Image (cartoon, rainbow, N blue to C red):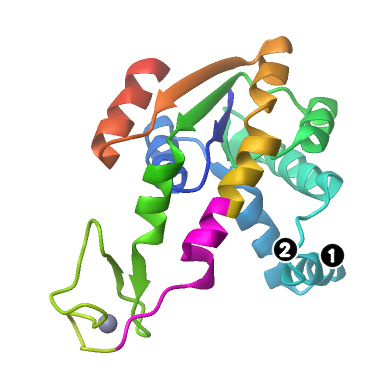
Amino acid sequence: MIILLMGPQGSGKGTQGDLLAKELGVPLLGTGALLRAEIATGSDLGKEIANIINAGNLVPPDLATKTIAERLKQDDAKDGALVDGYPRDEDQLAMMFNHFTPDIAIVLEINDETAVERLGGRWICPDGHVWNVNSKPTKVEGKCDHDDKELSQRIDDKEDAIRQRLAVYHKDTAPLMAGLAEKGVKVIRIDASGTIEEIQDRIKSIIK
Ligand SMILES: [Zn+2]
């Protein structure tokens, strides 16, 4: 059984993907991780991918699709796999159906304000300690509780950048659900507000 896990940034997709993959005993395949693995090999393909990503562009749909399709053929995916964050747009959707057809698409739904609150509150210490002004605040604003170092925000975590990515999701990814359903993929929408455990329970109750 191939399951797509979809949803905007801030929906908790990464966390839920890890938990669900363990629960089902199947590998979690993300284009990001697969592409990073290719980059790490230092191959020509890896260098090509690195150049595209470093320029701030999305990896072309054929490259992303081939990477996933190849990975699905490996032994540990023969009973199924969880595919994270793919397809992203119409081009990838069309290519996906040339290579494989998923059984289920789980869509984590979250409103933009909640996503911005979750991601936008993140502040990071140079030593990697992660805080959140909304859910995990420090005792002194802007200083790490562990080592008193100055906290900063990643450019990716600034509100404008988050809203821009959410807009891309609404424009390119959200409309794909209709195309998936048309091809017989069971689309399951999950309310992704609340705690990690609450979201996990909602997913489990539907998968079983
Ligand atoms: Zn620290």
Quarter of the figure that contains the C terminus:
top left
In the rendered image, the quadrant that contains the N terminus is top right
Residue 99: x and y in percent read: 81, 30
Q: Where is residue 193 in the image (x, y as percent from the top left)?
A: 33, 35
Q: Nearer the viewer, residue 187 or 102?
A: 187
Vertical position of residue 60 compared to residue 188: above or below: below
Residue type at mark 2? Answer: Glu
Q: Residues within 10 Å of mark 2 (few under 14, many from 20)?
A: some
Distance CA(mark 2)–CA(mark 1): 7 Å
Answer with left or right where residue 73 lies relative to residue 165.
right
Query: Residue at 60% of width from left, 53% of height from top?
Result: 164
Q: Report the residue that reaches farthest toward the left.
A: 139
* Residue annotated with mark 2: 38
Kindly tell me whether residue 87 is visible in this rendering. Answer: no
Q: Is mark 1 on a helix, strand or loop?
A: helix
Q: Is residue 71 magenta?
A: no
State the image coordinates of residue 71 (x, y, percent, origin top left): 70, 44
Residue at 16 percent of width and 79 percent of height: 140
Q: Residue 146 appears in which quarter of the rendering?
A: bottom left
Residue 129 percent across, percent down from the top left: 30, 75
Task: Please report contact status of discs 2 and 1: CB closer than 8 Å, yes or no.
Answer: yes
At a point 24% along the width and 83% down the height, the residue shown is 143
Residue marked by disc 1? 45
* Callout 2: SS: helix
**Magenta residues?**
150-163
Location of residue 174 (image quadrant): top right
- Figure quadrant, ligand 1: bottom left
**Mark 2 residue's CB less than 8 Å from ligand 1:** no
